[in-house]
Amino acid sequence: MRPSPVPAAAGVYGWHFKESPSPRLDAGRLLYVGIAPRYMANRASTQNLRKRVRYHYRGNAAGSTLRFTLGCLLGLELRRVGSGTRLTFGKAGEATLSQWMADNARVCWTEHGEPWALESQLISRLDLPLNLDQNRHNAFHDRLKELRAQARRRARELPITS
């Protein structure tokens, strides 16, 4: 594994894409922000920018709301896996999504000691159509929420895959 330029620190990260995941969204602009770690009142988080960015690039839809959203926008088939409670795009779909992200996704970040505070400010002030939490005011919010709900409903109708 080659060294990552992303620091193992707390902060906020932002995603933009050379090719848009949806014809309704412009390519090349900031579409989503996330944080690491999230605020945890009862315990310390082990998450940091490097771990979260790496997971978004290489993980699966069950552990990354960004991957879940992108896969839905790209028309990948969501499936129940394992015990049937986790939802991913399956091995082939997740590989397709990882390749699409490698070709199109670009991430930026800034270190911040309390990223949850900065995230709230960014979501309230910027047009971030792929963020759902704290973002009901966004014009794309209802469409994205419904698209994700449709994918979940369809996945529950399909057999569980390995």
Image (cartoon, helix red, strand yellow):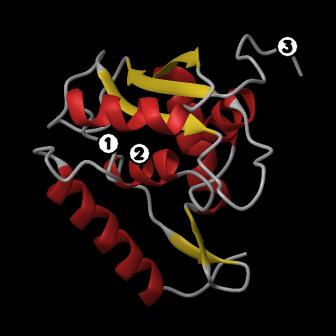
Viewer-proximal residue among 7 and 100: 7
Viewer-proximal residue among 74 and 120: 120
Residue 2 location (% of width, % of height) = 86, 15
Residue 139 location (% of width, % of height) = 10, 45
Residue at (29, 73) in percent of width and height? 150
Residue at (65, 54) in percent of width and height? 40
Of the image marks 1 and 2, the number of the one nearer the N terminus: 2
Q: Which residue is mark 3?
A: 3
Q: Secondary structure at mark 2?
A: helix
Name which quarter of the figure residue 77 lies in: bottom left
Q: Are marks 1 and 2 in contact (CB under 8 Å)?
A: yes
Residue 109 location (% of width, % of height) = 55, 17
Name which quarter of the figure residue 126 lies in: top left
Q: Amino acid at mark 2?
A: Leu
The Cα atoms of the two marked residues, 3 and 1, are separated by: 28 Å
Q: Which residue is mark 1?
A: 130
Of the image marks 3 and 1, the number of the one nearer the N terminus: 3
Q: Quadrant of the N terminus?
A: top right
Q: Which residue is mark 2?
A: 70
The Cα atoms of the two marked residues, 1 and 2, are separated by: 9 Å
Q: Are marks 3 and 1 in contact (CB under 8 Å)?
A: no
Residue at (40, 75) in percent of width and height? 152
